[in-house]
């Protein structure tokens, strides 16, 4: 009799603990249908979880984008052009037009000469010295350090002083052109390399008339200003057809608004 | 650093401006449209190319930008 009671109690305790455990499990891990039902409103907990998942997704996406941006900012594949200001093997200090960079070399860095360069020694890092001009390819970080993949020794880039002027033709011969600009008269030599353009087409010197508006690109070389390009603004009325007597006294407004006699 | 023998130079400046592009291979001209946009294909020579882009507006004001491009025939 006692044994029967004990059995009954054990069964009751087992059942009740199973029931309690089941309730607890369901509350911790709710079970949802695999397929969406047609019921108009999902259970409130389900929409909360979906919202939280979406929130997390967007947070992760924005963090990933920020990280990517930072990495890209820190490491950039670049080519630098500059002059060596110091050598401290395996590092070089390179002065570019804008910044000073530390170039870090390693056993995989390839050294070569540009085809036009006269630097004909067997090229190693030890042969490089202050004043050599280089093109360096590699990854630059945000501390202005570049891990060099390739170094090309080049000749010193030629410094050309170029001038651009807008003005009206005062005089033109086969050898030179004189134009009236807002800052005064500019005279430039014409060489076989001087290009004459009207719009996109090449023209002859005979097409260039006094009084016409031109833009001249010129360089200063061997104590002389040389016209590299003379650009005649297109669709300008020909001045040759104007009556002769009006031309000498006529005044033309220059680009700066000042009147200049032509 | 480029591997093609030409490069597209483009940008925006004052509308109606004339652009003079000086490169190792010669001088080129481009005209900015009514929005100020311009573009021009410029030929390159192997090695370092210095490209000077000068914009001249209708009043004669000039602005210049200089760029350096290294053209390599072989892939590095």
Image (tube, grey):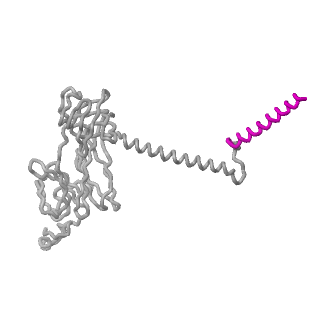
**Is residue A57 shown above or below A245?**
above
Q: Main secondary structure of the magenta part?
A: helix
**Image quadrant where one finds the C terminus of chain A:** bottom left
At 25% from the left and 46% from the top, the residue drawn is A98
**Is residue A128 shown above or below A188?**
above
**Residue A139: where, in percent of width, then height?**
34, 37
Q: Nearer the viewer, residue A147 or A1?
A: A1
**For the magenta stretch, what is the residue range?**
A1-29
Question: In this view, which residue lies farthest toward the right?
Answer: A1
Going by the image, does A56 lie left or right of A68?
Answer: right
Q: Nearer the viewer, residue A131 or B72?
A: A131
**Image quadrant where one finds the N terminus of chain A:** top right
**Residue B30: where, in percent of width, then height?**
28, 55
Question: Where, by quadrant of the figure, is residue B69 drawn?
Answer: top left
**Residue A67: where, in percent of width, then height?**
44, 43
**Is residue A159 shown above or below A246?**
above
The number of discs equals 0
Question: Where, by quadrant of the figure, is residue A126 drawn?
Answer: top left
The stretch drawn in magenta includes residue A21: yes
Q: Nearer the viewer, residue B76 or A203?
A: B76
Question: In this view, which residue lies farthest toward the left?
Answer: A223
Going by the image, does B31 lie left or right of A23?
Answer: left
At 24% from the left and 59% from the top, the residue drawn is B56
The stretch drawn in magenta includes residue A77: no
At 13% from the left and 69% from the top, the residue drawn is A261
**Residue A62: where, in percent of width, then height?**
48, 47
């Amino acid at each position: 009799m006692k044994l029967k009671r004990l059995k009954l109690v054990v069964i009751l305790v087992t059942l009740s603990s199973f029931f309690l455990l089941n309730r607890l499990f369901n509350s911790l891990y709710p079970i949802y249908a695999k397929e969406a039902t047609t019921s108009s409103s999902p259970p409130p907990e389900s929409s909360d979880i979906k919202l939280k998942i979406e929130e997390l997704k967007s947070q992760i996406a924005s963090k990933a984008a920020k990280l990517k941006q930072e990495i890209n900012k820190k490491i950039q594949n670049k080519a630098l052009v500059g002059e060596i200001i110091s050598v401290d093997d395996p590092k070089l200090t390179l002065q570019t037009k804008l910044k000073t960079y530390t170039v870090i070399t390693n056993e995989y860095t390839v050294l070569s000469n540009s085809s036009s360069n006269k630097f004909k020694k067997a090229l190693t890092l030890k042969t490089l010295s202050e004043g050599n001009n280089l093109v360096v390819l590699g990854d630059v970080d945000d501390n202005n350090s570049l891990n060099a993949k390739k170094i090309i020794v080049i000749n010193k880039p030629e410094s050309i002083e170029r001038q651009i002027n807008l003005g009206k033709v005062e005089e033109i011969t086969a050898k030179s052109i004189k134009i009236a600009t807002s800052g005064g008269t500019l005279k430039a030599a014409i060489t076989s390399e001087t290009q004459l353009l009207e719009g996109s087409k090449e023209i002859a010197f005979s097409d260039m008339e006094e009084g016409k508006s031109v833009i001249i690109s010129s360089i200063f070389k061997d104590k002389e200003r040389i016209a590299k390009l003379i650009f005649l603004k297109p669709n300008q009325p020909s001045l040759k057809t104007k009556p002769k007597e009006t031309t000498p006294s006529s005044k033309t407004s220059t680009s700066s608004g000042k009147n200049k006699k032509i | 650093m480029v591997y093609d023998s030409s490069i597209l130079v483009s940008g925006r400046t004052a509308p109606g401006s004339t652009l003079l592009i000086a490169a190792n291979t010669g001088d080129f001209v481009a005209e900015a449209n009514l929005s100020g946009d311009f573009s021009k294909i410029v030929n390159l020579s192997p090695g370092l190319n210095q490209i000077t882009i000068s914009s001249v507006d209708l009043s004669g004001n000039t602005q210049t930008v200089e760029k350096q491009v290294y053209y390599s025939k072989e892939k590095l």
